[in-house]
Image (spheres, rainbow, N blue to C red):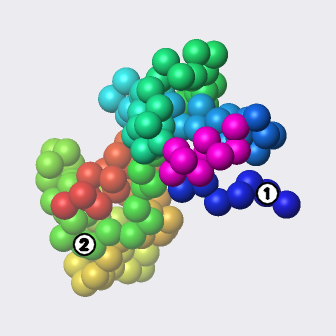
Amino acid sequence: MGLPFINTRADLDALTGTPEHDAFMALLAGTLWRVEKDDTAQAWVAIEDNSTIERFDFARADFPGAQPPALPGYVPVVDPVPEVVTMRQARLALLGAGLLAQVNTAVANMPGAEGDAARIEWEYAQEVRRDSPLTAGLSAALGLTDAQLNNLFTAAGAL
C-alpha cells in the first residue's frame, strides 16, 4: 500500500514501532548525502547533506550506521564535433591554426573541372560540412589527421 503521509516529526513519531516508521527512517538515511559530478577532479563526490533530516528535527548522529552511497564511474563530458560550420568560422579557425594560406593555395592549384568546382564552393558556399568531399580532399592535401580536422571544426564551432 505504501507509506502513510509523513510531513512532520510528529507524524513520524506517531508511527514509532511500526514497519512504516522503520521504512521512513531508512529513506531519511538515504538523504544524508547527495552525489555530484566534479568535472575538474574527474570524479563523482558524495557531499554530506543534512537538509532533509533537519526538516524532521534529526541530526546525523541519529543515523549511526548510515554509509555514503557507492559512487558511479566518472565519464567525461565529450563535446561533439560540429558537422557544419559557417565559412566565416572555417576560415577564422584555419587562420588561427596558421593553415588558411595553405588551404587557399591548395584550392587555387586544384586542376580541371574538380578544381573549378572546389574554387566555386570555397568562394561561394555559406557553410563547410565535416563530411564533404572538399573537406576530405583539403584535409588529405594538408596531411591532417581526423583528430586535427575535428579540432579545427571544434575551434570553428566555438567562434
Q: Give whichever of discs 2 and 1 has the lower sequence position.
A: 1
Classify residue 71 by image quadrant. top right
What range of the chain is rendered magenta? 8-16
Give how far across and how far down residue 157 sits, in percent.
29, 61
Q: Is residue 22 left or right of residue 11?
A: right
Q: Which residue bears the numbered disc 1?
A: 2
The answer for how far apart the CA atoms under marks 2 and 1 are is 60 Å
Give how far across and how far down residue 16 sits, in percent.
70, 37
Let me know if residue 15 is in the magenta part: yes
Numbered badge on residue 87: 2
Q: Residue at x 47, y 69 (%)?
A: 132
Residue kind at label 2, given as amino acid type: Met
Give how far across and how far down residue 111 sits, in percent.
37, 68
Q: Residues within 10 Å of mark 1 (few under 14, many from 20)?
A: few
SS at circle 1 = loop
Of circles 2 and 1, the one toward us is 1
On screen, residue 41 above or below 27: above
Q: Is residue 87 left or right of residue 64?
A: left
Q: Is residue 120 left or right of residue 62?
A: left
Question: Which image quarter holds the N terminus?
Answer: bottom right
Residue kind at label 1, given as amino acid type: Gly
SS at circle 2 = helix
Report the number of discs. Answer: 2
Let me know if residue 24 is in the magenta part: no
Q: Residue at x 64, y 60 (%)?
A: 5
Front in this rendered view, residue 52 or 14? 14
Q: Residue at x 76, y 45 (%)?
A: 20
Numbered badge on residue 111: none
Classify residue 107 by image quadrant. bottom left
Is residue 19 something that shows in the picture?
Answer: yes
